[in-house]
Amino acid sequence: MSVAAAAEIAGNDLIVAREGLAGVLRLNRPKAINALTLDMTRGIAAALDAFESDPGVSLVLLEGAGERGLCAGGDIRGLYESAKAGGDLGPVFWREEYILNARIPDYPKPYVAYMDGLVMGGGVGLSAHGGNRIVTEKTRMGMPEVGLGFFPDVGGTWLLSRAPGEIGTYFGMTGLAMTGADAIYAGAADVLIATSDWPALRDALTNAPLQATAKDVRAILARFAATAVDAPVAKHREQIDRAFGFNTVEEIIAALEQDGSDFSRETLKALADKSPTSLKVTLELLRRAHGSKSLRECLIREYNSALVVFTSAEFAEGVRAAIIDKDRNPKWGPDRIEDVTPDIVAKYFAPNEKYRLVFPD
């Protein structure tokens, strides 16, 4: 498939272009902070096919249009409307999105993601699995899905479970955003640059040598890397490891309450408005991911769980409160941690007889 044909799949929502020796993917829904749609996902996959077979493309560059961020996540409103109508957008979209996520780490050409501004949910899946992940002083990366009756997906459980100590558990359960420095500390990014340096770095990347290697790209990034910046989350590492090292949400909350510090109180506040069911499902997914051997294994597990979320009252209520009515007052059911039984959680891990996630050979 040609670059032009790939661009037509997603229309104006995705710009696919050749700039110098770089294949450029620009998410182009700035008013929606480049929220990802099914057509955009298909366009990216087609563009990666085109760039892979094009000998004139040395590397792939992912960026977002506008100044607010790379990508605010998936098109949650579209998923909500499909779920309410009994449609199948969720199973179809997530299957194609997760297959795309799994492709990124093994892409044969250097894959560079510019993760400026907001990088949420699906935006993390498009960027943080790559080999060259650039963040800035404006980066706010997060997986806030627990506030929508959902959980960190797009391989988020793989990424978070491999962060130092319990840092990933903390971010996955609270839904709080990482700074650029936090993202590097958590292993979700590689290089921090000043946003003012991006034009020059971008120019250097689009003029990278023909058949540039991963080493060549890393050398270019190193020229613009900022001096070491302390990660704000690092100073709370001991408290996080102590509290989030437990395997039940009840024990984690009890540990935070016992700690009693300002940080623990703020963490409890962040947990308080999240779906109790999502908290327990997220913790179980993270613990299982810790023992997984591959991103694909985690994505298959996430897909099965997402299918349950799609038809759940929790997802509908979370999206209603956050996006539709915007009252920020979800009515979860159950609304207490202790009322989320093992049987409720187990439903999210049962195989689905209708839909399966199968990766291409």
Image (cartoon, rainbow, N blue to C red):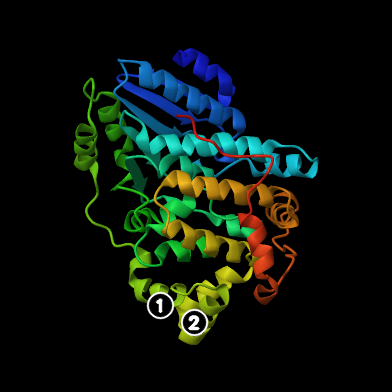
Q: Nearer the viewer, residue 28 or 276?
A: 276
> Where residue 130 sits in the image (x, y, percent)?
37, 40
From the viewer's perspective, is 151 left or right of 86? left
Image quadrant for the C terminus? top left
- What residue sits right under mark 1 in the picture? 242
Which of the 4 image quadrants contains residue 78? top right
Q: Position of residue 355 (x, y in %)?
A: 65, 39
Is 307 located above or below residue 260 in the figure? above
In the image, what residue type sits under mark 1?
Arg
Of the residues under marks 1 and 2, which one precedes in the sequence?
1
Residue 180 visible at all: yes
Closer to the camera, 20 or 349?
349
Q: Residue at x 62, y 61 (%)?
A: 278
Residue at 64% across, 63% down: 345
Numbered disc 2: secondary structure = helix
Q: Do the residues bearing badges 1 and 2 touch, measured as CB atoms within 8 Å?
A: yes
Residue type, label 2:
Ala
Question: Is 182 left or right of 89, judged from the image as shown?
Answer: left
Say which residue label 2 marks: 255
Provide the secondary structure element on which disc 1 rests. Answer: helix
Q: Residue 260: x and y, percent?
A: 48, 85
